[in-house]
Image (cartoon, grey):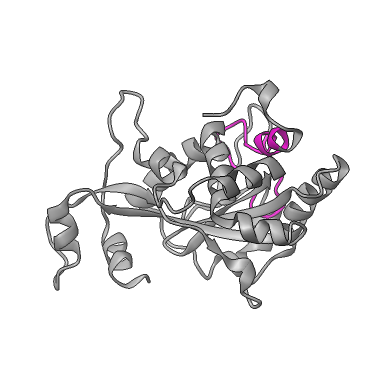
Amino acid sequence: MIPPDQEISDVDRLSLSLVPHSKASACFTCNNTPGANQEYQRCAKCRLITYCSRECQKKDWPIHKEACFAANDQSNFVIKCFQRMHTDKTFMHYLDLDLADKFCDSFTQNPKKMWIIVTSLFILPSGKEDLKAATSQEIPENPMAGHLVLSGFINVSAYPDYPVEDKVRRMWQQVRDDLDGMNAKDAVAVIVEFNYMRFRFYISARAISKSQLVEAKKGNRSSERRRTSLWVEEMRNRKGDVMPCVMGDDDIKFMRTGK
């Protein structure tokens, strides 16, 4: 859980302030955020990407059209779950801690670098029999219950050819400037990109404090049971029930081939 306010650093407060206060996401193109009673429109086809205006949508379309796909029950389920995730301060705090655990050595060696980390959401079979059936030679005809899973983290900053748009650079630079302004030069500004079906649908700027990196160095980082993964696994609806979703053909195909 998040520590009491008096126990967290100014950098931690900055990172928590980056968590949206409403379910409506920021504009994917310009990163503007909606007002208290305002909700931005999503792409009419995939329903994953949010825009504040037609102009921003047109500007992003040449890139977005390469990955855009028709919305379905599965993508709507992912949106519903992610709206809870990215507006939950505990989850985002866990995200910062997991990033510190995973990359503390790299972050410490070069805190001023523009770090970009990618993580993905998947819908995987809930039962062992369904998992076995999904990986068999033939795709099963019967409906298959699935659940949401958050993958590990990939440091794409290490890939020289990884495309980085100007809007992403601006998001990172704003956090870096804020950190430098509070004399937190050892803190790290990180961009986290969230994917579904290899399709990036949300970008979050994070601030990792020096204290988090120090604690990560002291701890046992060999565990694969990350806080964020457990949070997603334990997510429940308002009635306290698990949040299942029937797997689609695309989810099963992606699980088999990664495409």
Q: Which residues are magenta?
A: 12-34
Q: Horizontal and vertical percent for residue 149?
A: 36, 50
Residue 21 among those drawn in magenta: yes
Measuring from the top left, give residue 110's x and y in whole percent.
Answer: 73, 61
Viewer-side residue, 144 vs 108? 108
Residue that extends furthest to the bottom in the rendered view of this protein: 161
**Residue 127 x %, y %:** 17, 49
At x 54% / y 67%, what residue is drawn? 65
* Above-or-below relation of 144 to 1: below
Q: Quarter of the image holding residue 167?
A: bottom right
Horizontal side, residue 204 vs residue 121: left or right = right
Say above or below: 224 vs 10.
below
Residue located 67% across and 36% down the image: 34
Along the line of sight, which residue is nearer the eye, 10 or 147?
A: 10
Q: Magenta stretch mostly in which secondary structure?
A: loop
Q: Would you say residue 41 is visible in this rendering?
A: no
**Residue 15 highlighted magenta (yes or no):** yes
Report the side of 150 relative to 14 (left or right): left
Residue 64: image location, x then y, percent: 57, 64
Residue 155, by quadrant, is: bottom right
